[in-house]
Image (spheres, rainbow, N blue to C red):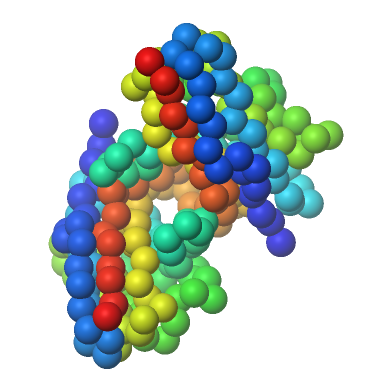
Amino acid sequence: AQSVTQPDARVTVSEGASLQLRCKYSYSATPYLFWYVQYPRQGLQLLLKYYSGDPVVQGVNSFEAEFSKSNSSFHLQKASVHWSDSAVYFCALSRGRGSALGRLHFGAGTQLIVIP
Amino acid sequence: GPKVLQIPSHQIIDMGQMVTLNCDPVSNHLYFYWYKQILGQQMEFLVNFYNGKVMEKSKLFKDQFSVERPDGSYFTLKIQPTALEDSAVYFCASSFGTGGSAETLYFGSGTRLTVL
C-alpha cells in the first residue's frame, strides 16, 4: 500500500521568509511524486513533479522540492515567499505505471498563510 | 493554462435522489478522473475512464456510482440513489496520456455536494 503524510496542517510565515512544507511517503518502490497548489475557488495546479534523476526538481514560481529515498520524503521549498503564495499545498504520489499514473494518493494538505 | 470546468459548483439534494455532476475536461484530453474529498480529509481517487470505459476504480466507487462521457460531451459522475455519506467535494481531472509529460492531471475547482 502507499500513503502520503503532510504533518503540518497549517504553516504561517512572514513575507520574504524562506519556506519548507514537509511531505513523507510510504511506498515499497520509487514513486512518482507531485506537489499541487490550490488557490481559493480554483482547481489544483501542478507545481512540480519527480520521476527519476536529479533529486532536486524545479517548479513554477521558484518552488523546488528535494526527493530523499533514505528519508522517504519530498519536501517543498521556496527561498522567499510572497503573500500571493497563500494557498493549500498538496503532496501526492503515484505508482506511475500506465493508467495508475493518474491514480494519485494525496496528503491531507498544508494551508500556507503568508503574513504581509 | 488548460482549464477543467465543473458544473455546478455547489449542489444540495435530498437523500435518495439522483444527482449528476458534470465536468468539461480539457478539449484534447483522453483520460478522465473523479476524486472525492470529505471535509477535513484527504482527497481520494474514485475512478478513471478512457476510451469509453472505466479503467480502474477504488473501493469508494460504490455500485450507486456511474460515469460516462456520451459523444465527447461532459464527463459525468452520477450517484443514484444518494446517501448522507456522499456529501463531499468531487473533483474532476483530465490528462492527455499516461506517460512522460502527457500525464499531468488538470483539475477542476470541484463540486460541493450536500446530501440532506
Q: Position of residue B69 (x, y in %)?
A: 24, 67
- Relative placement, left or right, of A38 versus A108 is left
Counting labels gives 0
Residue at 34%, 61% in the rendered image? B89
Residue at 70%, 45% in the rendered image? A25
Residue at 49%, 74% in the rendered image? B60
Q: Position of residue B70 (x, y in %)?
A: 19, 70
- Relative placement, left or right, of A8 versus B86 is right
Depth check, front residue: A49 or B69: A49
Q: Position of residue B83 (x, y in %)?
A: 35, 84
Q: Is the C terminus of chain A in the top left, top right, bottom left or bottom right quadrant?
A: top left
- Asked where in the image residue A19 lies, by quadrant, the reply is top right
- Asked where in the image residue A32 lies, by quadrant, the reply is top right
In the rendered image of this protein, does residue A78 appear above or below residue B68? above
Depth check, front residue: B104 or A83: A83
Q: Is the N terminus of chain A in the top left, top right, bottom left or bottom right quadrant?
A: bottom right
In the rendered image of this protein, does residue B65 appear above or below residue A69? below
Residue at 35%, 72% in the rendered image? B87
Q: Position of residue B17 (x, y in %)?
A: 22, 87
Quick one: which residue is furthest to the right in this view? A70
- Could you tell me if residue A78 is visible in this image? yes
- Could you tell me if residue B102 is visible in this image? no
Depth check, front residue: B102 or A37: A37
